[in-house]
Amino acid sequence: MPAYSEEQILAGCRDKKRAYQEQLYCNYYSLFLKICARYARNMLDAEQLLNDGFLKIFNSIDQYKNAGSFEGWMKKIIVNTCLDYLRLVGQKEEMSMSEKSVPAEESNVSVSNYCIENMEFKEMVRLIQSISPVSRTVFNLYVFEGYNHKEISEQLNISIGTSQWHLHYARTFLQEKIKKSEHKIKSYETRRI
Amino acid sequence: MRPEEFDELIRAKFDQNEFDFNPDNWKKLQFRLDFQPSRRSVAIWWFPLLGMAAVLAAVSVGFATYLKNAVPARRNVAPITAVRRKSTNETTNKAAMHILTAKQSEESLKVIAEHKGNNVNAVNDSIIVVEKDGFIGINRDNALKNFELQKKNEKTRDKPEVIDLAGNSEMVKAQRRKKIITDEGRDKEIAEYRSQTNLKKSTSTIDILGGVNCASRNCASGFTIGTSGKIMISKRVFLEGDLAFAGSSNTQQTASLSENGFSGLFTTSVAARTTDASAQATPSALPYSIKTGNQAFNMYYAQFTPKLGYNLTHRISVGFGPDFQQALQDNRPEAAVLAKYNYLVTPLFDFGFVGKTEFSLTSKVRAAFYYRKGFNNFINPMDKFIDRDYFQVQMKYAVFNHLKSRQ
């Protein structure tokens, strides 16, 4: 596949040319699939979300007026697609959540850097996907997209306190899961020795 | 470990790792790009043309009807009567001075020529003056009949009598309602006649309305019931507002994807898809298959339509204005949010414009042809709404009609 510049890709995509669309898809496949994988409940849904997001990008690429980063514009569409997905999944699971109070202190589960760094990437993705939808989304928005709790509360139509609770819950959940996997790794290594 | 440190480690984990490109995912997307519905379907472009043609036809029919029923020109209007005084039992010159405004036919000219000796004269092309005897006619048969009747009355002279009049104009009909007209009552008769025949115009009206919507797509056919208020702001320009309850029958197509395990439902408009048949017949070699099915549902809207109108004639008016419709309940089938921006959905708040042509059938009953064009997709850049474009045939009945004389 020939390498095109971003301007060429943009122009080609505006003309609905498949080769340029494919190039754009290839270039951003991994980056955007990582985003989708964090929001989805499994990789099949993540791939579906990725394609939904790219479909929106291709259909509305004429609306990109070269103002700001093209990657940022696409990323926003992908994240919005993921948030729409949450509203679908979350509605069924826990959108009717009541006000939740934040614990006085953050949990302090001891997780080693070593364990996180040596954990399989796919295992890490799987752990994030196992968090409940709303908590997962709050965690993603806060940690990866850089939203604050006020912005999250407006985006998800929840209170700031509820947002804080979900972030706390997601962190605790992940840390506990990582801790468990740490024990498994240690016991496996002990057996090997 | 502090929460910030934990977050940083998780972020780093994602930054340092990549997913391998999977060509199958591109094939799936390519398939969807190839089979996605065309936003500009064939059905759309001719719809406005059809609307304009229908409005033009309606205006033509209305104008022709108006011309057919038009009252003759009203120059020198006066009751056409011959009055005989009771006291003298004679037909006075004054009473016999009557003017009929009518187009002078060839036949009437012949009548005038034949009865020249009876003081029948033509003043000009359109006015016949009967100077003495109460005889007048605008066609031969009626004129002769009236002449004979007058002769007969001259013999009996027992009671005052209005000599019959020929013609079918409004003023003749009005005249016939009074069998006896005395000389003293003549002025009153004239005034009464004028009040009857001078058409009045309404300055404000309140109507009840009912209409039927018809759309080329299965998204807006339905009905409208409500009320309408109208007020004249000048001789020809008026403001009008409709407040109505509208129901529309919608049909959307649901499609489910299978094979890749994703269980989302996709909802799209039937009308918005031009490749339905091909989509249903997905070849098995493609990455996944689509199962489609129609789902019908009703939407109910509260409608407010302010309009600025113009009276072309006293029977025909045109109007134009914005149309606001708010769904009273969200009855839409549950659509996959994933597909929210890819497929068209029925709007909950629907903004559009209406144009109408209205005909006064009677003083209380009016018929109107509306064309409504949805405007949501111009406002919303994501172009995700079904355009609720439709024709409407509407009948209005005036429950309150404040009339004012033209004079």
Image (cartoon, coloured by chain):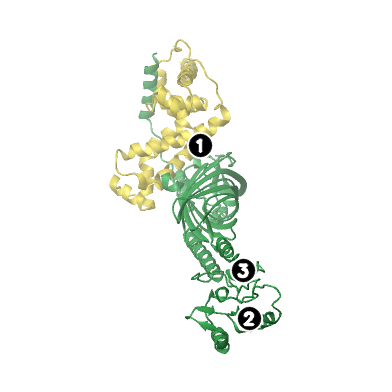
Chain colours: A yellow, B green
Protein chain holding label 2: B
Residue B398 at what x, y percent from top left?
59, 52
**Residue topped by disc 2:** B142
Residue B160 at what x, y percent from top left?
67, 72
Give the residue displayed 51% in from the left and 67% down from the top.
B63
Q: Nearer the viewer, residue A79 or B259?
A: A79
**Residue topped by disc 1:** A45
Question: Are dots 3 and 2 on a single chain?
Answer: yes
Protein chain holding label 1: A
Q: CA distance from mark 1 to mark 2?
A: 91 Å
Give the residue displayed 48% in from the left and 27% down from the top.
A157
- Residue type at tag 2: Asn
Protein chain holding label 3: B
Question: Are dots 1 and 3 on a single chain?
Answer: no
Q: Which circle, 1 or 2, is nearer the viewer?
A: 2
Residue B90 at what x, y percent from top left?
63, 76
